[in-house]
Image: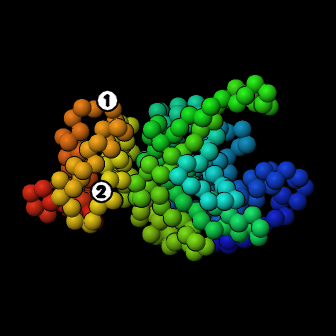
């Protein structure tokens, strides 16, 4: 991948926000690829299409790009709230690419992929409506709570200026594609339990994961049977080759 942003496409723009949008979208169009299939190219969607910025011409997977000239942090502002939530609930949410670039020399530093099969309403936070004096008064934006996602949902494409091999990216993407067939509730539970598992040593016990019972109860206040729910998620992760059953009450993360 070429990590420098070609500045010529934005030569006739004056707004810094417009310049950044044009340059990052052009870079992604020239350098992006589809993690869901072997396609090494993506097509840009029409300017009036909501939420989706790019689409794979081969498998039709959709993608949204969010670029920042600084570190993303644990929460990232990410466009209008309602259209995003509606797409998540009807199963048409795009995969998300988050880009960090250097404002001084216009180079790409980090690009991270969040697969759509990890996306649930719980990781999208509603922001306060814009004030009546704002140009878009009443508009309601959203933030993506990246910090709540397990590490497996944050797939590096470029890490500290180094491109990750495409085969590795696609393998990481496809490893959790079984989530596509799960309900939103199940996706949320699996992602949250997986995030807890990722805080433990590679081999852990049931008691180790039970230590997160209080945290998971807060994340899912409607469920009063947290321990059985934890065991259910571990079973699903085991059945899909993410965990290995070592002995009664003992697990190993692959």
**Disc 1, SS:** loop
> Between residues 64 and 248, which one lies in front from this camera angle?
248
Q: Are marks 2 and 1 in contact (CB under 8 Å)?
A: no
- Location of residue 67 (image quadrant): bottom right
Q: Residue at x 46, y 36 (%)?
A: 121
Spatial separation of the CA atoms under disc 2 and disc 1: 22 Å
Q: Residue under circle 1?
A: 222
Q: Residue at x 45, y 63 (%)?
A: 170
Quadrant location of the C terminus in the rendered image = bottom left
> Between residues 58 and 115, which one lies in front from this camera angle?
115
**Disc 2, SS:** helix
Quadrant location of the N terminus in the rendered image = bottom right
| Res 85 seen here | yes
**Percent of width and height locating residue 61:** 53, 50
- Disc with the residue nearer the chain's start (2 vs 1): 2
Q: Residues within 10 Å of mark 1 (few under 14, many from 20)?
A: few
Q: Which mark is residue 33?
A: none
| Res 183 seen here | no
Q: Residue at x 37, y 39 (%)?
A: 219
Q: Residues within 10 Å of mark 2 (few under 14, many from 20)?
A: many
Q: Residue at x 67, y 39 (%)?
A: 49
The correct choice, above or below, for 208 with respect to 91 in the image is below
**Percent of width and height locating residue 105:** 76, 70
**Percent of width and height locating residue 111:** 58, 62
Q: Residue under circle 2?
A: 197
From the viewer's perspective, is 165 left or right of 214? right
């Amino acid at each position: 991948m070429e990590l420098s942003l070609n500045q010529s496409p934005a030569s006739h723009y004056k707004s810094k926000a417009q310049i950044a949008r044009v340059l990052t979208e052009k870079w992604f169009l020239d350098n992006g690829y589809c993690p869901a299939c072997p396609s090494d190219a993506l097509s840009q969607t029409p300017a009036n299409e909501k939420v989706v910025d790019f689409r794979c011409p081969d498998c039709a997977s959709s993608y949204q790009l969010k670029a920042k000239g600084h570190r993303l942090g644990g929460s990232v502002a990410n466009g209008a709230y309602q259209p995003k939530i509606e797409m998540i609930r009807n199963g048409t949410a795009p995969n998300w690419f988050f880009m960090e670039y250097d404002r001084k020399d216009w180079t790409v530093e980090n690009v991270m992929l969040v697969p759509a099969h990890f996306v649930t309403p719980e990781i999208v936070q509603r922001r306060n409506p814009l004030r009546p004096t704002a140009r878009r008064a009443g508009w309601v934006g959203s933030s993506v709570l990246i910090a709540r996602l397990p590490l497996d949902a944050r797939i590096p494409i470029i890490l500290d200026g180094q491109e990750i091999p495409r085969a590795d990216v696609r393998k990481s993407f496809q490893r959790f594609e079984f989530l596509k067939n799960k309900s939103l509730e199940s996706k949320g539970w699996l992602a949250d339990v997986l995030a807890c598992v990722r805080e433990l040593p590679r081999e852990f016990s049931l008691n180790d994961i039970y230590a997160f019972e209080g945290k998971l109860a807060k994340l899912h206040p409607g469920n009063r049977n947290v321990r059985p729910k934890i065991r259910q998620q571990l079973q699903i992760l085991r059945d899909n080759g993410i965990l290995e059953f070592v002995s009664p009450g003992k697990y190993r993360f692959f």
